Image (tube, coloured by chain):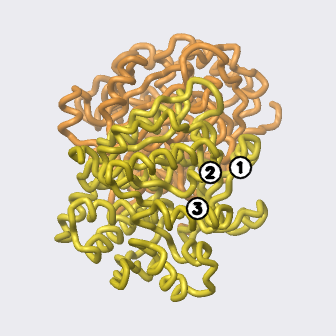
Chain colours: A orange, B yellow
């Protein structure tokens, strides 16, 4: 096997978030399911944006957030995702590169604009996301470089990639390259509605291609159509090589065959914005794995990173996660 | 005199801020004068951006921030400024309109991109600004509508507008329209370096055209080439109809002929980002004037709004200033 140059290579939708404060009444008026991610087209995005309050633009994208987190911990991250050669695309590329992530996917020179996610943050810190996939849906197999995939210890994929048809094919191609090179493939289920859209395909993928699964309670229960978390845990232990199940303030459960570790969350005074909590949990966990740390410690690192991200607006770390981990003796 | 439809009409550079965390070493390496605003061209903006850490994009512009603040207090604000018909221009227009500000200036369909200001925020909360004026320098007399100016109780102008030659002419045209309609003209000096660039012109303007002057200590001392603040206050009392001089944590001094009021700042635990402090002070003060409040109370409202803005990242209020004022019985 060739030497590992990259600790974690993420593939995902390359998105700029537009975060704005909202309230439950606004969500209700616009029939938005609180806490979920809905796909919208450009016209819907324009219409919703017109009604939203003033926003803050900040780079996002689920796997991109995770890789930015991995880099912030001090590991080597790389990201594959499609932007357009527009202002938001330049912002996305700048931000992910500025933290040391390898990002070399060519920007589209025609077609839809860079993807954006209109994120409505309610006073309880919960986020409701409305994504216009834009240029990111044109990620294709041509954007996947076999050598790069082969040089990464872990390939990390977001479930959201299953929505754009072309991106799904790129996702599967990358999975093949990773396994050919003897690397591990990690998948995050992304969203319970996303799981609902592709349950059978995800179950199939899980059996064949996924070495590490990340999911929250709603997602894992949806995947296995389980009526309670305990049943979902049992099914995960049978179906997954390694499953990492997050439960918000209840911490996480890590399942590997007969091994099962429960790791508490890191307490916080005030949840400002949960955008990116799952993404950053995965960052900490994958960083821990890259350093060959025991599974419970990987969970602690995930909890620490999730805690940092929910303490402020936006889904990219505001401080060095490496320094944060050091300060907690992790 | 026709009825007043607008409380405060601002004219300024229409800018999107790119805020990123930095440190003193970075400022020194790039020969940036801490706390100041430097004009840079597109190539310099690209070069500096490449070196900056990941940012947050948020609508800015000095007078635009002030008008957003005026609207947040519940008064009627309007803004004139030039963006390009690009993504950042749409963000700027959305954000200022979303708070109820009248913004009808046509976006440029050719020429440079929407202006952006690269703001480096150091750990002490101080901001150092690097502005690429872009489309905003093409604001012209054609963008000034006499009826709109005549319908505004106060015309508010930022000193920064003196930099782009065309905008300066628009500024002077608007001043003429305002005075023809019997309205008041307010000016903020914007920046000590800006004052240094145009000292004689600003002094001349002050005598002829300005009814309300806003300046901080460094700016007023630079304007009158005074060696200390006391001398500057004396000169301001002679030269200005109404001068409002801000002194950061020392509060402000309001001078009107022989009247002189000192108003303390509103205390704060932690200064996160001083971007917009002066702009929001002016917002509170002008809102107070629009409600015919006594001058010291106008100063209190200014201090309150400045306090809100330095408690978080960005130069637009994160909460309703009307609610904040009510909660403080102002």
Q: Is residue B227 visible?
A: yes
At 58% from the left and 64% from the top, the residue drawn is B191
Residue that mark 2 sits on: B118
At 63% from the left and 14% from the top, the residue drawn is A110
Residue that mark 1 sits on: B40
Q: Are marks 1 and 3 in contact (CB under 8 Å)?
A: no
At 23% from the left and 42% from the top, the residue drawn is A23
Q: Nearer the viewer, residue A17 or A182?
A: A17
Host chain of mark 1: B
Q: Residues within 10 Å of mark 3 (few under 14, many from 20)?
A: many
Q: Quadrant of the C terminus of chain B?
A: bottom left
Q: CA distance from mark 2 to mark 3?
A: 10 Å
Residue that mark 3 sits on: B121
On whether disc 2 and disc 3 are found on a single subunit, the reply is: yes
Kind of element beneath mark 3: strand
Q: Quadrant of residue B315?
A: bottom left
**Residue B45: percent from left, percent from top:** 70, 45
Question: Foreground mark, 1 or 3?
Answer: 1
At 57% from the left and 32% from the top, the residue drawn is A88
**Residue B190: percent from left, percent from top:** 54, 62
Q: Nearer the viewer, residue B157 or A40?
A: B157
Q: Are marks 1 and 2 in contact (CB under 8 Å)?
A: yes
Sooner in the amino-acid sequence: mark 1 or mark 3: 1
């Amino acid at each position: 096997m060739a030497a590992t140059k990259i600790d974690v290579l993420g593939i995902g939708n390359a998105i700029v978030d537009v975060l704005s404060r909202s309230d439950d009444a606004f969500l209700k008026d616009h029939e938005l399911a609180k806490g979920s991610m809905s796909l919208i087209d450009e016209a819907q995005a324009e219409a919703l944006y017109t009604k939203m309050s003033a926003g803050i633009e900040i780079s996002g994208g689920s796997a991109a957030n995770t890789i930015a987190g991995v880099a912030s911990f001090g590991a080597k991250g790389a990201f594959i995702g499609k932007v357009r050669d527009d202002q938001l695309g330049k912002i996305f590329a700048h931000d992910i590169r500025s933290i040391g992530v390898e990002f070399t996917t060519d920007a589209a020179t025609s077609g839809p604009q860079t993807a954006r996610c209109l994120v409505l943050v309610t006073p309880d810190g919960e986020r409701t996301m409305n994504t216009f996939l834009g240029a990111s849906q044109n990620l294709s197999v041509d954007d996947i470089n076999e050598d790069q995939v082969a040089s990464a210890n872990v390939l990390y994929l977001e479930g959201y990639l299953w929505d754009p048809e072309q991106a799904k094919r790129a996702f599967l191609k990358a999975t093949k390259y990773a396994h050919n090179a003897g690397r591990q493939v990690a998948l995050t289920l992304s969203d319970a509605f996303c799981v609902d859209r592709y349950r059978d395909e995800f179950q199939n993928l899980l059996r064949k291609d996924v070495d590490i699964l990340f999911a929250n309670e709603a997602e894992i229960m949806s995947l296995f159509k389980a009526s309670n978390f305990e049943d979902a845990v049992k099914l995960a232990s049978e179906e997954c090589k390694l499953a990492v199940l997050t439960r918000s303030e209840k911490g996480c459960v890590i399942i590997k065959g007969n091994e099962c570790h429960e790791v508490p969350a890191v307490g916080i005074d005030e949840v400002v914005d949960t955008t990116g909590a799952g993404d950053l949990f995965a960052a900490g966990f994958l960083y821990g794995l890259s350093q060959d740390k025991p599974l419970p410690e990987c969970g602690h690192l995930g909890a620490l990173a999730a805690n940092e991200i929910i303490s402020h607006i936006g889904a990219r770390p505001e401080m060095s996660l490496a320094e944060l981990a050091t300060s907690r003796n992790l």
